[in-house]
C-alpha cells in the first residue's frame, strides 16, 4: 500500500476552511471514495486534520503508486458536482484556472501486508478465484498466477491428506 500525506489549500486563498466548506469536503471525500475508480484501484482519501483555516492535511492510500497531487481530481470533481447539485454557491468564483485545490506532498511511505487473519485469507482466495472478470489485464495475470499457486498447494495438501 502506498500512503501519501498532502498539505492542501484552496486555489483561491480568499476561500478558507470554515465549518461549511469542511462539511462539503467531508461529503466530497465520501463520494470520491465510493467512486468506481476508487474502488477498482483500491484508493482512499482521508481527512487527517485541519492545520489552520487555509490548510488541511489529507492522506491518500493506493494499492499502486500514483501522482498524489494530481489524484485529488476525483475529490475536486466530487466537491464541485455535489455543491452544484445543492446550488450552494460555495465554490462560485473560487475555481482558479480550473483548479479547486493547491496541493503539496508532505510525505510518501509504502507499507506491505505481512499477516492476514483466516477470514481475510478466505476473502482474498475467493476474490482471486471468482473475481477475475472485474480486473484489468495486469491484475488478471497476477490473479491467474496466484490461482495456479493456490491450486498447486491444495492438490499437494489433498494428496498428503490421502496418504495419512
Image (cartoon, grey):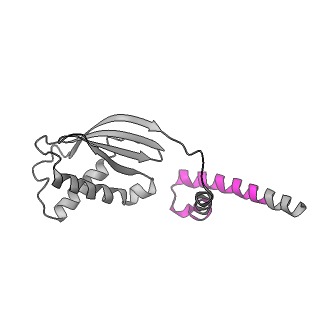
Vertical arrangement, residue 148 with respect to residue 58, above or below: below
Q: Position of residue 39 (x, y in %)?
A: 43, 58
**Residue 103 visible within the image:** yes
Q: Position of residue 141 (x, y in %)?
A: 60, 52
Q: Position of residue 104 (x, y in %)?
A: 29, 35
* Magenta stretch contains residue 109: no
Q: Position of residue 156 (x, y in %)?
A: 80, 56
Q: Which residues are magenta?
A: 127-155
Q: Quadrant of the C terminus?
A: bottom right
Residue at x 22%, y 59% (from the top left corner): 81
Horizontal relation, residue 153 to residue 22: left or right: right
Please identify the quarter of the rendering in which residue 117 is found. bottom right
**Residue 67 visible within the image:** no
Nearer-the-camera pick, 23 or 40: 23
Horizontal relation, residue 107 to residue 132: left or right: left
Residue furthest right in the image: 163
* Magenta stretch contains residue 154: yes
Horizontal relation, residue 36 to residue 89: left or right: right
Horizontal relation, residue 17 to residue 150: left or right: left
Residue at x 32%, y 44% (from the top left corner): 58
Amino acid at each position: 500500500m502506498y500512503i501519501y500525506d498532502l498539505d492542501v489549500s484552496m486555489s483561491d486563498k480568499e476561500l478558507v476552511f470554515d465549518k461549511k466548506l469542511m462539511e462539503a469536503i467531508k461529503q466530497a471525500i465520501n463520494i470520491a471514495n465510493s467512486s468506481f475508480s476508487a474502488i477498482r484501484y483500491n484508493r482512499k482519501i482521508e481527512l487527517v486534520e485541519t492545520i489552520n483555516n487555509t490548510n488541511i492535511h489529507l492522506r491518500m492510500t493506493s494499492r499502486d503508486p500514483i501522482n498524489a497531487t494530481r489524484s485529488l481530481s476525483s475529490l475536486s470533481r466530487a466537491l464541485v458536482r455535489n455543491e452544484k447539485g445543492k446550488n450552494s454557491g460555495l465554490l462560485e468564483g473560487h475555481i482558479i484556472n480550473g483548479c479547486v485545490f493547491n496541493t503539496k506532498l508532505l510525505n510518501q511511505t509504502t507499507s506491505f501486508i505481512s499477516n492476514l487473519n483466516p477470514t481475510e485469507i478466505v476473502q482474498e482466495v475467493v476474490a482471486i478465484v471468482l473475481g477475475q472478470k472485474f480486473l484489468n489485464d495486469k491484475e488478471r495475470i497476477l490473479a491467474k498466477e496466484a490461482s495456479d499457486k493456490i491450486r498447486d498447494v491444495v492438490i499437494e495438501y489433498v494428496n498428503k491428506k490421502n496418504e495419512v
